[in-house]
Image: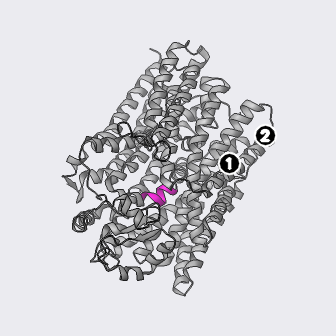
Amino acid sequence: MFKGKFIDNLPKIYGLYTGGFLVFIILMAIAEQAGMDAKTIGILFVAFTVCIYAIIGYLSRTVQVDAYYVAGRQVPTVFNGMATAADWMSGASFVAMAGGIYFGGYTYMAFLIGWTGGYVLVSSLLAPYLRKFGCYTVPDFIGTRYGGNVARFCAVVVLSLASFTYVTAQINATGTIASRALGIPFELGVWVGLVSILLCSMLGGMRAVTWTQVAQYIVLIIAYLIPIFWMSNKNGMGFFPHFMLGEEVARLGELEAQFGLVKNAAADVKAAGVPGGLKSIALPHAGVPDGAMAAWKFISLVICMMVGTASLPHILMRYFTTPSVKAARKSVAWSLFFIALLYTSAPMLATLSKLQLMDPNLATGIIGKPIADVMQIEWVNSWMNVKQAFIADFNGDGVLQLNEWFMRGDVVVLATPEVAGLPYVISGLVAAGGMAAAMSTADGLILAIANALSHDVYYKIIDPKADVRKRLLVARALLVVIGAAGAYIASMRITSILGAVAWAFDFAMSGLFFPLILGVWWKRATRQGAIAGMITGLASGTAYLIYVYPKFMGNPAWLGIDHLRFGIIGASVCLVVMVVVSLMTPEPDSATQKMVDEVRIPSGKTILGKQH
Amino acid sequence: MSNKEKHWEKTKGLMILTLAIWFFFGYVVFMFGSSLNTASFLGYPLAYYMCAQGSIVAFVILIFWFANRQEKIDEEFGFTEREGDD
């Protein structure tokens, strides 16, 4: 059945895999009809998919350096696109994004634009050139282009800080999902999540992560799209929701006007005993807030997310795995295509699930109904029991108003199938999808950090004579250590899923964006300039974050640049310092200039050798 | 100007054009969000639509277009990769 090389058989293998997964869903649906209980279905979904990933991870084990670091540079364009999409779409995209739109409407959708448009920067400014460079890691590029261990080390610091901020949020998400699907406490769920993550990456490094990520993408996109199409069709709202929900969006506007968008006073919320992190709907779904400040807030968030995208090492390193420069460029396009499938669906999911709750004409609507009746609904009960939903009767009329219904943003996606009265098999599927999304991103991130530490710090700086066996051993040991550290911090529950994710983008853009692009696009950029830029960029960004974040110093934001947008400060400082210092120091030597010339054309040998 | 310099000039030109289009769909559109929203497309308010789908689809098309154009530029100057270049 499978003749020839593994790479040539990929479409067949993943086609079969997708078919198998669909069969599994159908089997579960049959089992549900036959009376299997909801809990078992949830466990089976998560366990089955995680086992598959672990098997792929085991089969992709390797003892070769270039397979471990860059998957042997033979990942075909479209498959690398899928892997990048899974790498990219995290627990935040899958679990929290539709929830964010649910509560924040148009203003929140700045994330959609920011998290897609960044790929234009990746393809036009960076990916093809880094691929030509032939580096294993992002600091590998910085260290070779600018020369010297200091530059390399600074890049490792920025990379580790940004990726680690991000990874705790992902492990947190795997913990949330694992604890719910398997019915175990969150603190234990975090460690179960970590073990599943490591199973995918330990033995095969980038090669294993690549092939599990493709598998995870398939699961997560199926899990995201099925409920949307199902809900839309079940309620007769449109066969193809993406193009046919105009009326529903308008209807939401009417309902908002009817119920009134009330922003609860913080004191009232506290007095009613609403658990932390729960929100009520207080912003219009499709309405654009007026004024220049509102537009700037939207645009500044877009800037941070886009520039951050182009500086996040776990994404950039995916393009080191393609067979050619040309393939790297095309692969960025495919990545965004696969990401867009989910991102253009998120607003539709938010629209549908909001309407299910708000429209009194639908059987599932709860707003405007007597609170006593709403309390009887099973899903309301089960989410209230775990403090993910809450009802506070502020005006004491016994009827549920829009501002009296509280829910955690992260549970919107997970709860929607139950809210819409879909069979439990869909909830199980969604849990498996969320798990896939969070796991794939966590894998990419942990690998990015571990690779930077093992390749750039251990091999390039500490022990350049280490043999392959020892290098890979160190790389694997670091994976475990970093994963465990992430899981430990996640188990302490410090921030909500999304705050931390935006920070990762800001950290990355503060320290890495300009050193990366100027390294390719400006020959005059010098080592001293890059080092000064990375240090001052990261320091000023971090200082501003501490200055402005409510839980630290809590000062008023300057020009609307709050703690989600601190990268604007960091990156600006980085650019100015880097340019000034570069111009003050002697220009790079001719060997470096020649290297930059070589990077700019696709043909010829890579700058760094195949094995280095 | 050497072949390499000409190639880089054209590559830079394409980069600037690509980023100009990117800037339009990523920023300019949303500077006028509240006025755009009075118009509608497929029944959606226009700014909402651009945010939910319009700009994202534009980015996907833009990157595919960019990749093809850049390949043509590489071909024109004879810098296309050959098998075994790696």
Does the magenta run of residues contain A96?
Answer: yes
Question: Residue A424 at x, y = what percent?
Answer: 49, 77
Residue type at the position of mark 1:
Ile
Q: Which callout, 1 or 2, points to the residue nearer the camera?
A: 1
- A361 relative to A59 in the view: left or right: left
**Which subunit holds the residue at mark 1?**
A
Quadrant placement of the C terminus of chain A: top right
Residue labelled with disc 1: A482
Q: Quadrant of residue A118?
A: top left
Q: Quadrant of residue B17?
A: top left
Residue type at the position of mark 2:
Val
Does the magenta run of residues contain A118?
Answer: no
Question: Residue A260 at x, y = what percent?
Answer: 25, 65
- Judging from the image, what secondary structure is the residue with disc 1 in? helix
Q: Is residue A105 above or below residue B14?
A: below
Residue labelled with disc 2: A468
Question: Considering depth in this image, is A36 or B64 the residue closer to the camera?
Answer: A36
Q: Are marks 1 and 2 in contact (CB under 8 Å)?
A: no
Task: Specify start and end residues of the magenta stretch as a single range.
Answer: A91-97
- A448 relative to A260 in the view: left or right: right
Q: Residue at x 61, y 72 (%)?
A: A182
> How many C-alpha atoms fall within 10 Å of the one at disc 2: few (<14), some, or many (≥20)?
few
Q: Earlier in the sequence, mark 1 or mark 2?
A: 2
Question: Residue B79 at x, y = what percent?
Answer: 51, 28
Question: Residue A163 at x, y = what percent?
Answer: 58, 44
Q: Is residue B1 above or below residue A100?
A: above
- Label 1 and label 2: CA atoms lie apart by 21 Å
